[in-house]
Image: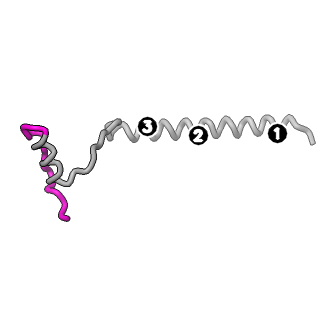
């Protein structure tokens, strides 16, 4: 099976059947939805990393404070 042509669009098909045939001819097997635009991904990753870093720092501070109060 050869790959479908690159850059082919089926948006100009006149009927639903023509659209289905065009998609089948281009070997389209599913649909894709971009929920976040690519430029926002870097900011989201930094935001998530900063939240995890803050949580790790809070847990570490809690453990040091809690451990310092306990006398052995």
Q: Nearer the viewer, residue 36 or 25?
A: 25
Q: Residue at x 20, y 65 (%)?
A: 1
Q: Earlier in the sequence, mark 3 or mark 1?
A: 3
**Can you say which quadrant of the picture contains the C terminus?**
top right
Residue 3 circle label: none
Q: What range of the chain is rendered magenta?
A: 1-16
Instruction: Classify 10 Å Cα crowding around label 2: few (below 14), some (14-19), many (20 and above).
Output: few
Q: Are marks 3 and 2 in contact (CB under 8 Å)?
A: no
Give the vertical position of 68 relative to 29 (above or below): above
Residue 67 circle label: 1
Mark 1 residue element: helix
- The residue pinned by badge 3 equals 44
Q: Is residue 35 magenta?
A: no
Give residue 56's quadrant in the image: top right
Q: Provide residue 43's location: percent of width, then percent of height.
A: 41, 37
Instruction: Classify 10 Å Cα crowding around label 3: few (below 14), some (14-19), many (20 and above).
Output: few
Q: Earlier in the sequence, mark 3 or mark 2?
A: 3
Using residue 49 as the reference point, say whether residue 1 is left or right of it.
left
Q: Residue at x 12, y 42 (%)?
A: 17
Q: Provide residue 51's location: percent of width, then percent of height.
A: 55, 35
Give the vertical position of 35 relative to 26 (above or below): above
- The residue pinned by badge 2 equals 53
Q: Nearer the viewer, residue 3 or 69?
A: 3
Q: Provide residue 47's location: percent of width, then percent of height.
A: 48, 36
Q: Provide residue 41's location: percent of width, then percent of height.
A: 38, 40
Mark 2 and mark 1: Cα distance apart in space? 21 Å
Mark 3 residue element: helix
């Amino acid at each position: 099976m050869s790959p479908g042509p690159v850059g082919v669009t089926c948006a100009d098909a006149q009927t639903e059947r023509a659209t289905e045939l065009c998609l089948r001819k281009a070997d389209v097997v599913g649909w894709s939805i971009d929920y976040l635009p690519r430029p926002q991904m870097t900011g989201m990753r930094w935001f998530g990393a900063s939240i995890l870093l803050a949580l790790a720092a809070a847990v570490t501070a809690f453990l040091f404070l809690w451990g310092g109060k306990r006398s052995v």
